[in-house]
Amino acid sequence: MEKWQTKEQLTELLYELVKIPSVSGSQAEKEFPEFVIHKLSELDYFKENPAQLNKVPTEDGRFFISAFVRAQRPIEQTVILFSHFDVVDVQDYGKWKEFAFDPETLTNKFYDEKEKLPKEVLDDLNTGNWLFGRGIMDMKSGLALHLSLIEAACDGRFEGNVLLISIPDEEVNSVGMRAAVPYLLQLKKKYKLEYTAAVNSEPMFSLYPGDRNNYIYTGSIGKVMPGFMCYGKETHVGEPFSGLNGNLMSSFVTAEIELNTDLCDYDEGKAAPPPSNLIQKGLKESYSVQIPHRSVTLFNLFLLERSIEEVTDLLKEKASLAAAKIEVLYREQAERYASATGSAAAKHKVRVLTFEELVSYARQNLGEERIQKIVDTLIAQRGEKDDREISIQIVDQLAILCKALAPMIVLFYTPPFYPAVQSHHRPLIQETVTKVQKLAQTNYQTELIEQHYFSGISDLSYIGMPAKRTSMKELTANMPIWGHGYSIPFDAMEQLSVPVLNLGPIGRDAHQWTERLDADFAFGPLKELLTISVQELLTKKRRSE
C-alpha cells in the first residue's frame, strides 16, 4: 500500500514533519532523524535491507539521514536527493508563536484574523492553496517529496539507484553537509556507484520584491562572511581628539560596504544581491568613560564568479576608502575644535591590513610559539561562543598585542563559507531542464525560468567544486578558526564534483512569520516534475555512454 503518493498523504506527512520543532541547534533537531528513520523503516525495501537506512553522526552530536535504494538490477548510476530538516527560530511569530509548528491550526488562525495579514499574504490565503508554518516551505515540503521519491524507488519505478541525504544545520554552519561529503565518497566506493547528479528541492526564491516568476536552478550561489576589526585609540571621553572611536570607524566601514552594488558579483550580466551587514558591535565589555576603541562589523557577501583573491582586493579597497574618510572627518573636526579652544590638532593615519598580515606581524614581533599558544588557549576556552564570536575574539586579542599598528582596520573571514557552484553547461543537466520546462508549460501552464544560481544559499555548494580551487588558500589564511573546529572537505568535494539541480516548491517569505507553501503545486505538478527529473538524470546518463 502506498504511503506518500497522493496529495492527501503528502500533506499529512508534511504536517508530521513540521510539527517537530527542529530549530538549528535544538534537541528536536537531534531527534528529528529518528522520526524519519522510523517512517522509512516501515517500507518493505528497508525491512529487507536495513543496512541501507542509516542515521549518521556528525562531529558535534547531531545526525544526518541516509536512505539508499538500489535498482532492481545492478547498475552504477545514482541520483542523490538532498534536503535539510533544520529550521530557523519562531520568535517572529509573536502571538502566533505557539502555533508556528502546527500548519493546520496556524492556517485556520490566519483565516480567522484575515484583517491582520498583509495584502499579498491575504491574497494567497484566499486561494485556499496555501499552508503556513515554520519550515513548511524551507524545506520540509522538499523532504516530504523526497520521501515520496524514495518510496517510488523502493517500488522499482526508477532505472537506477536513488540516495536520500537529509541533514541538520543547513541554516547555520552546514555541519551536516560537511560531514556528509566524506560519507558520500565512502558509499560510492563501497557500492561502486557513479553519482550522476545531485537534486535539491529548496523552494523558489524571488529575485526582487513582488517577483512572482517560477524558477529551476542549475547551481547554487556562494557566500563569504568578511569581517572588519576596527582598532582605534583609547582615550577619556573628555579628550575625544586624543583617541579614535572604534564605533565611528566601523560605522564608516559599514556605510562603505552596505548595499554597495560595486561589490555585486555577476554571471552573464545578472547580478547577485549586494552585501548586507549581519553583525556590528563595539567590543567594550563594561561601562566606563573610556571611549570604545575596538569594534567589529561583519557582512554577508554573495559570490558567483569571483575568486577570493578578487574579493579580498575589493574589500581592502572599500576599507581604504572608509579609512580615508575617517581621517578626513577626524582632521576637519580636530582643526575646528583646535581653532575654538586654541589647542593643537592631532592627526591619525588608519592602516588597512588582512588577518594574514596581522598574524605575520605578530609572529615577527612576539614569536610563533606565543601566538600559537594564544590562539590555542582561546579555542580551548571558547565555551558557548559560536564560530563568529570566537573568530572575532581571536582577531581582537591579536590586534591588542599589535596595537603599535593602530589605528587599523583588519579584514578577516568567518564561517560559514559556501563555494559558488553551477552546472548550466553540463549537457545532462541542460537536457533535463529543457524537458522539465516543456512539460511544466504543456501540462501545467507553468513557466519555469532557468537560473544559474539558487539565490537562497544551499548545501549543494559542497557537492560540486568551485572552479577556482587555488583561491581557497586566500580564504583559509584569513579565517582565524580554520583548522580549529571549522574546515571544509575540499579534497573530498573535488573527488565528488557532482552536477547539481534544484527544483523545489513555490513558496513565499522564507524565515518570516508569513512563510507559506503552495500545496497544490508542491504535491501535484512538482511531484511529477521531480519524478521525471530523477528518471531523466538516470536514463540519459546511461544512454549517453
Image (cartoon, grey):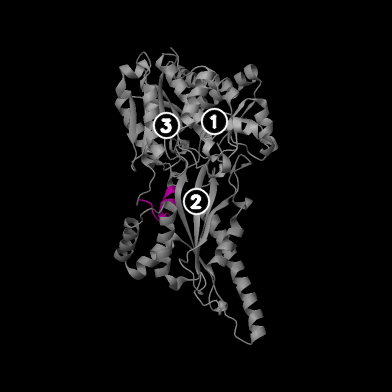
Q: Along the horizontal axis of the image, is 176 left or right of 5? A: left
Q: Along the horizontal axis of the image, is 492 left or right of 501? A: left
Marks 2 & 1, CB-CB < 8 Å contact: no
Res. 520 in view: yes
Label 2 crowd (10 A; few <14 / some 14-19 / many >=20): many
Q: Which numbered disc, 1 or 3, marks the residue closer to the eye?
A: 1
Amino acid under label 3? Ser
Q: Residue furthest bottom?
A: 342
Amino acid under label 1? Pro
Q: Which mark is residue 225?
A: 2
Q: CA distance from mark 2 to mark 1?
A: 34 Å
> At which x and y percent is residue 63?
36, 36
Q: Nearer the viewer, residue 532 or 241?
A: 241
Q: Nearer the viewer, residue 221 or 296?
A: 296
User: Tag 2's secondary structure?
Assistant: strand
Image quarter where the N terminus lies is top left
Q: Which mark is residue 56?
A: none
Q: Nearer the viewer, residue 54 or 512?
A: 512
Q: Which mark is residue 103?
A: 1
Q: CA distance from mark 1 to mark 3?
A: 21 Å
Res. 200 in view: no
Q: Residue at x 60, y 54 (%)?
A: 258
Is 346 included in the stretch rendered in magenta? no
Q: Which residues are magenta?
A: 471-483
Of the image marks 2 and 1, the number of the one nearer the N terminus: 1
Q: Which mark is residue 166?
A: 3
Q: Along the horizontal axis of the image, is 229 left or right of 272? A: left
Q: Residue furthest top?
A: 1
Amino acid under label 2? Met
Marks 1 & 3, CB-CB < 8 Å contact: no
> At which x and y percent is residue 251?
58, 62
Of the image marks 3 and 2, the number of the one nearer the N terminus: 3
